[in-house]
Image (cartoon, rainbow, N blue to C red):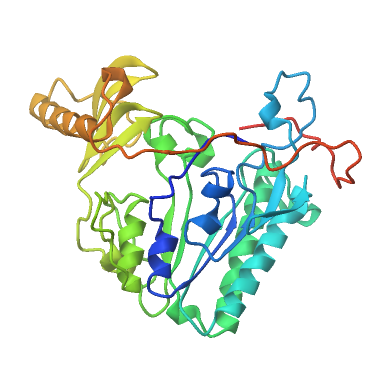
């Protein structure tokens, strides 16, 4: 939250810091959300450039805040940062994606002669939904569709820039997301059960699209298990950067996959947490749930046959339940589980600072272009 004392610990080594060790230029544009205190900002974690919102776009001043008893920490002006400086408060969100694309293009042009890493974290389609009129006119699905249209435009603009600069065949482009949709089943999630904030597949599965002309053959589909954390080791390997040797790194090197090799099985298991609660584990095609919302919940699903997680197979396969439960026990010892009262031997400390403060403070005399966003949507 704005002004929170928690954030990414200074001892952690981000992918940006790894790539800087092999002299890559590193830039980030968009949503950070790993802490807004100076010690936590992207420029303190390996990025040469940062331009964006330090947290979600719903964490500014919005209509009806006083009526809804919104915490005061969310009633401060939304800050737009350039590196570590607030350059605007309460920016026009309808114009922000275009400004983001401009910064991305500036970064590409500045570093076109050298290796670079650019991380672009969109605000869309997080609530509140703001998109320019041109995209609202094109949308067949209201404000949400307009935001998706603008994401599509931004991708096209950046791919065009790579082609213009002669970099398209020498650049890996990764397109993915941070969580499942907000709706249970339906058009966005298809057959998947659950939504954002749940450990059902609908809350966890996201697109994973890799584009690298001349390296990745087009039209391939990889249907095995990969986690976003595996991009850490995979990208490091492509760049020739060494992983830290003084700590456990849970990332698996998927660099062959990032170069188009879909023959290997990289990750065997994946653990599903809701905050500090370990709720499920997947290994291969099988997924075992053991809790939901703090309460016991036991069910076994074959995700290849039943991606909707509707048919409990635990009575038929007690041996698979036993094996998956053993994986859960290993994970609890490593990363903890508040439902079991376990801290986890491998948990590293989060960053904490004293006397935190918000980056902005409301001033009735400030010439905000938008003093309060007209939408009350948060989430």
- Can you say whether 307 is above or below 21 in the image? above
Side (left or right) of 102 relative to 316:
right
Give the residue drawn at x 71%, y 46%: 79
Coordinates of residue 30 in the picture (x, y in percent): 61, 54
Residue placed most toward the observer, 130 or 133: 130
Give the residue drawn at x 73%, y 50%: 131
- Tell me the quadrant of the picture where the N terminus can be found: top right
Coordinates of residue 360 in the picture (x, y in percent): 73, 41
Coordinates of residue 351 in the picture (x, y in percent): 45, 40
Side (left or right) of 197 relative to 41:
left
> Is residue 377 among the parts visible in the rendering?
no
- Tell me the quadrant of the picture where the C terminus can be found: top right
Side (left or right) of 353 relative to 267:
right
Give the residue drawn at x 37%, y 27%: 276
Q: Residue furthest top?
A: 295
- Can you say whether 267 is above or below 23 in the image? above
> Is residue 114 among the parts visible in the rendering?
yes
Give the residue drawn at x 36%, y 16%: 294
Residue 143 occupies quadrant: top right
């Amino acid at each position: 939250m704005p002004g929170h004392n928690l954030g990414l610990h200074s001892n952690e080594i981000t992918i940006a810091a790894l790539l800087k060790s092999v002299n890559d230029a590193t830039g980030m544009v968009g949503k950070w959300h790993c802490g807004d205190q100076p010690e936590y900002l992207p420029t303190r974690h390996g990025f040469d450039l940062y331009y964006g919102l330090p947290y979600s776009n719903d964490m500014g001043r919005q209509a009806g805040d006083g009526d809804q008893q919104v915490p005061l920490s969310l009633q401060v002006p939304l800050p737009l940062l350039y590196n570590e400086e607030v350059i605007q408060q309460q920016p026009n969100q309808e114009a922000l994606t275009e400004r983001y694309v401009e910064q991305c293009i500036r970064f590409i042009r500045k570093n076109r002669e050298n290796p670079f890493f650019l991380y672009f974290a969109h605000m869309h389609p997080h609530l509140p939904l703001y998109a320019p009129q041109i995209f609202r006119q094109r949308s067949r699905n209201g404000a949400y569709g307009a935001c998706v249209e603008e994401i599509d435009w931004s991708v096209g603009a950046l791919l065009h820039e790579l082609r213009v600069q002669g970099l398209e065949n020498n650049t890996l482009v990764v397109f993915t997301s941070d969580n499942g949709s907000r709706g249970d089943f339906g058009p966005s999630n298809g057959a998947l059960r659950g939504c954002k904030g749940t450990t059902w597949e609908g809350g966890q599965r996201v697109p994973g699209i890799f584009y690298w002309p001349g390296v990745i053959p087009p039209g391939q589909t990889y249907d095995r298990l990969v986690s976003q954390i595996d991009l850490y080791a995979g990208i490091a390997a492509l760049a020739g950067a060494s992983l830290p040797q003084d700590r456990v790194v849970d990332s698996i090197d998927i660099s062959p996959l990032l170069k188009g090799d879909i023959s290997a099985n990289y990750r065997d298991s994946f653990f599903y947490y809701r905050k500090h609660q370990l709720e499920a584990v997947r290994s291969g095609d099988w997924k075992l749930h053991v809790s939901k919302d703090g309460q016991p919940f036991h069910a076994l699903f074959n995700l290849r046959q039943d991606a909707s997680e509707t048919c409990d197979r635990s009575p038929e396969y007690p041996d698979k339940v036993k094996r998956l439960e053993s994986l859960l026990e290993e994970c609890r010892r490593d990363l903890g589980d508040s439902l079991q009262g376990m801290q986890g031997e491998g948990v590293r400390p989060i960053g904490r600072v004293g006397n935190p403060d918000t980056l902005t403070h409301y001033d009735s005399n400030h010439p905000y272009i938008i003093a309060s966003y007209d939408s009350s949507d948060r989430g």
